[in-house]
Image (spheres, rainbow, N blue to C red):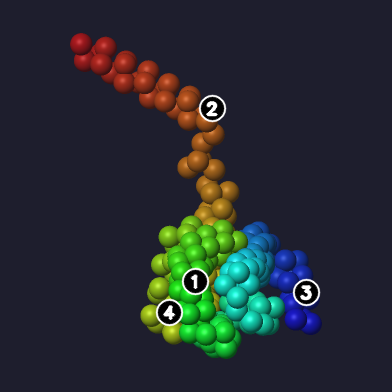
Amino acid sequence: MIDGPRVNSWLRQKTPVKARQFLTMFLDELDRSLGGFVRGQVLLATIMMVVVGLGAFIIGVPYVFLLALIVFVCEFIPQIGAYISGAIGIGFALSHGWQTALIYGIFVTIMQAGLDGQILSPRILGHSVGLNPILSIFALLVGTALFGLLGAFFACPAAAILQTFVLAFWKTWRERHPDQFPTDEQEQQLVEVTGHEGHDRSAMST
């Protein structure tokens, strides 16, 4: 954290000129992706804290504010965070009877597994780091299968970094090969020239 700005400045200003443009694009994309991931994770945790806390209050679970805080913190723990906060909430609800615990258990399962895992998490985190929700889910599945909990936690940032490499390389390649990407006017002129050449060839063959 202390040397980060100095390293960032060195990469932008002291590297070879040919590589400087690529590095600048990469660092900008990397900052946007990782910063977006942190902001998205905080937003997701806040939403689930409010939703679960409000539901627990309506159901009649005690220690609502403490439970909401636990939900917020556990939201940063991949895979098992929802189970931890859910089990603690059910334990709180048991003090008011098994009926309250059952109702809260059903509610928190729907919220955590359905709303959080299937709807909010892919969309918020994927959008925050610039990933399509489908790619976000795919990255989460691959990361979990290969590296377990750490893979699940770093799946979206890792996918965003990989996407950053690809985008930075693609932008640099396009700028170095402008002849391969003509503008709309150039494209129209090319079509007209091709059309005229085809017409002339057909007239000569006739």
* Residue 75: % across, % down: 58, 77
Q: Is residue 135 left or right of residue 45?
A: left
Q: Which mark is residue 5?
A: 3
Residue drawn 58% across and 49% down? 175
* Figure disc tally: 4
Residue, disc 2:
185
Q: Secondary structure at mark 1?
A: helix
- In the picture shown, does residue 156 fall above or below 123? below
- Identity, as a three-letter code, of the amino acid under mark 3: Pro
Q: Pointers 3 and 4 in contact (CB under 8 A)?
A: no
* Residue 68: % across, % down: 65, 77
- In the picture shown, does residue 121 fall above or below 78? above
Camera-near label (3 vs 1) is 1
Q: Which mark is residue 144?
A: 4
**Which of the 4 image quadrants contains residue 61?**
bottom right
Residue drawn 21% across and 15% down? 205
The alpha-carbon separation of the residues under discs 2 and 1 comes to 58 Å
Q: Residues within 10 Å of mark 3 (few under 14, many from 20)?
A: few
* Residue 170: % across, % down: 52, 55
Residue, disc 1:
107
The alpha-carbon separation of the residues under discs 3 and 4 comes to 32 Å
Residue drawn 74% across and 77% down? 4
Q: Secondary structure at mark 2?
A: helix
Q: Front-most of 188 and 159?
A: 159
